[in-house]
Image: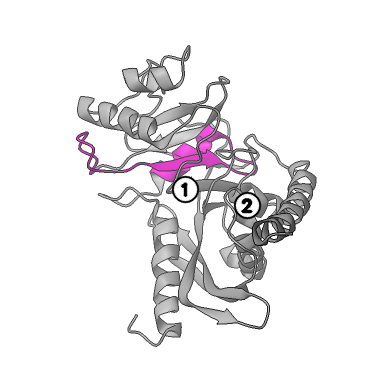
Amino acid sequence: MDAATSLEDPMRRVKERWRAVRDELRVGLIPRDDVDFAVDFADQTPNPNPKQKRPLRLVAGLDVSYRREFIYDSTHRAETAVACLAVLRFPELTPEWVDFEEFTVDAPYVPGFLAFRECPAMTTLLRRCPSGAKPDVVLVDGNGALHPEGFGLACHVGVECGVPTVGVAKDLHAFDGLDAKSARAACDEIAARGGGGGSKGVSKGVSKANPGHGGYPALWPDAVALVGASGTTHGAAMFGHEHSGDGAGCPIYVSGGHRVSLATAVAVARACRAPGRKTPEPIRVADARSRARVRLLEGKAP
């Protein structure tokens, strides 16, 4: 057996085991709204939950930062990392509770299987969160339904802990005819027009990437729906206020996780942005705090 085969076979078995776990968890996924809060906008964006009257009170972000150094033993290399849960008051977007979980990552990185590296630390943080700081919804730095299997990190975390989750990712998986270049082109075109809001398709390039679907519909003033070649709407590409329409900015990718529809996911992500920022504040704070903790562990100034 050559070296390539010996490395490939163990990973094949690992992925088969991970798929079995994912399939078991997927049975518990609720891909629609099962929340008791409402999100209101100053710009009069329609409320996706008009019958739900309780205002959103606490929103959380989950993110993981990795150390640059590795831990070696006789058999493998393991990374060390810090997960951060940042719970913010809404609509002030000021911290209510921040917690960290330092952990060793011994699972290899495999595209599409991020949950098996980061989910255990994230669920530990959520379960440790005191009752007075329990978030109404959790934004996870990773995908939800916008995933080749329709079950990304945000879905894993939500089902494991039974909490409403939203996926907020920096990168787009290429599947079902979706690709980042076309999504960015659609966002550029809408930004150049001064915003969307209709159901009309945009960008000829996008239309060619998704024949028969008229491009990625601009359903929000600053986001497009990511409609795959199958006709399924997997998520949304959302750009920030600073996006000028000249290709200067990259969108973020939002999708429903557990107990949250795409409409509510986008509503929450939009409502949680600070002025002039693209990334929702709970994710931004969790990212900044986890990076600062990593720098402390590395003996550097925060």
Question: Residue 105 colored magenta?
Answer: no
Residue type at tag 2? Phe
Quadrant the N terminus occupies = bottom right
The residue segment tinted magenta is 242-270
Q: Nearer the viewer, residue 289 or 104?
A: 104
Circle 1: element type: strand
Dot 2 crowding, Cα within 10 Å, few <14, some 14–19, many 20+: many
Quadrant the C terminus occupies = bottom left
Q: Nearer the viewer, residue 292 or 1?
A: 1
Residue at the far top: name it: 212
Residue type at tag 1? Ala
218 versus 273 height, above or below: above
Rendering coords of residue 248 (x, y %): 22, 42
The residue at 66%/51% (across/down) is 156
Taking the image as shown, residue 221 lies to the left or right of residue 131, namely: left
On the image, which quarter does residue 93 sit in?
Answer: bottom left
Q: Nearer the viewer, residue 44 or 211?
A: 211
Taking the image as shown, residue 2 lies to the left or right of residue 199, namely: right
Q: Which residue is mark 1?
A: 169
On the image, which quarter does residue 130 sit in?
Answer: bottom right
